[in-house]
Image (cartoon, rainbow, N blue to C red):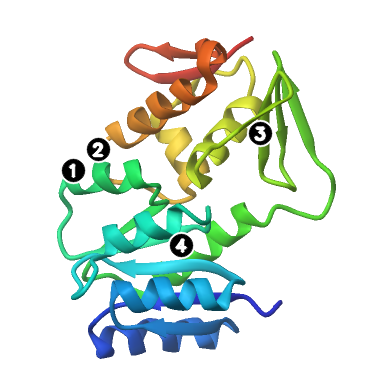
């Protein structure tokens, strides 16, 4: 495995140790932070962190604040750890650009599986893979999107969602299928997670957002 650095942020040292031990066993390099302020400082000073695992409730600066500050600088994938599974909190996180939510208590093995899934999606193979449709160009290897040759800023999850839609042009996709492929695990939460991301993606695509058709009672279809 390459030297992949993961920033683990939690004010509980026992929780940090649990997560770190499992990640180190899988060959990852782990950087630790005990609060949001330290997390931001470590991220800025380290530069090459590939993924962040961020707790919500912390002193000095909570997980949402720290994530929002990091999002101003980077699209690095962020997995949020939360003690409560509240829809409003999740929607708040997705607005900031959180990529995954894991509710405590959780299985460390599941956490590692999620980490590996996110890293696979954020480091897509070596080739110059380009997907084009209706004026949208998606460069998979560079994680870059342009519309009529103008750069568009998408979050990590929005990029993956658009990628999945464009690869499956003309195919009716259920919410369950989208969750299992884009989120890469069986999601037991509310389907509005997808609807929230689709709404934001459509807005960022402007007129091209009309390519994402709603199939009532089922899901979506990307069609130019």
Q: Residues within 10 Å of mark 3 (few under 14, many from 20)?
A: many
The residue identified by callout 4 is 114
- Disc 3 element: strand
Residue 49 screen position, x and y as percent: 56, 71
Which residue appears at 37% of the width and 19% of the height? Answer: 218
Above or below, comparing residue 180 to residue 215 in the picture: below
The residue identified by callout 2 is 190
Q: Are marks 4 and 3 in contact (CB under 8 Å)?
A: no
Whichever of labels 4 and 2 marks the residue nearer the N terminus, that label is: 4
**The quadrant where residue 70 appears:** bottom left
Q: CA distance from mark 2 to mark 1?
A: 8 Å
Which residue appears at 64% of the width and 26% of the height? Answer: 166
Q: Is residue 6 left or right of residue 138?
A: left
Above or below, comparing residue 126 to residue 32 in the picture: above
**Camera-side mark, 4 or 3:** 3
Above or below, comparing residue 2 to residue 148 in the picture: below
**Camera-side mark, 2 or 1:** 1
Q: Are marks 4 and 2 in contact (CB under 8 Å)?
A: no
Q: CA distance from mark 4 to mark 2?
A: 19 Å
Whichever of labels 4 and 3 marks the residue nearer the N terminus, that label is: 4
Q: Is residue 6 left or right of residue 107?
A: right
Whichever of labels 3 and 2 marks the residue nearer the N terminus, that label is: 3
Q: Are marks 2 and 1 in contact (CB under 8 Å)?
A: yes
Residue 214 screen position, x and y as percent: 42, 13
Q: Nearer the viewer, residue 124 or 109?
A: 124
Above or below, comparing residue 65 to residue 33 in the picture: above
The residue identified by callout 3 is 145
**The quadrant where residue 152 appears:** top right
């Amino acid at each position: 495995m390459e030297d992949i650095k993961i920033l683990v942020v939690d004010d509980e040292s026992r929780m940090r140790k649990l997560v770190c031990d499992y990640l180190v066993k899988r060959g990852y390099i782990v950087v630790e932070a005990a609060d949001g302020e330290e997390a931001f400082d470590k991220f800025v000073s380290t530069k090459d962190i590939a993924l962040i695992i961020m707790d919500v409730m912390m002193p000095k600066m909570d997980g949402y604040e720290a994530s929002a500050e990091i999002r101003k600088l980077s699209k690095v994938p962020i997995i949020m750890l939360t003690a409560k599974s509240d829809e409003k909190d999740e929607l708040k996180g997705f607005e900031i650009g959180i990529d995954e939510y894991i509710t405590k208590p959780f299985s460390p093995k599941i956490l590692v599986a999620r980490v590996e899934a996110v890293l696979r999606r954020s480091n897509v193979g070596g080739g110059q893979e380009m997907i084009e449709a209706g004026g949208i160009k998606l460069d998979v290897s560079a994680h870059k999107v342009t519309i009529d040759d103008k750069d568009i800023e998408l979050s990590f999850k929005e990029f993956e969602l658009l990628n999945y839609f464009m690869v499956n042009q003309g195919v009716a996709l259920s919410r369950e299928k989208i969750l299992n492929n884009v989120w890469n695990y069986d999601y037991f939460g509310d389907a509005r997670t997808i609807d929230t991301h689709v709404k934001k993606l459509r807005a960022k695509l402007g007129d091209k957002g009309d390519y994402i058709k709603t199939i009532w009672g089922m899901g979506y279809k990307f069609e130019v």
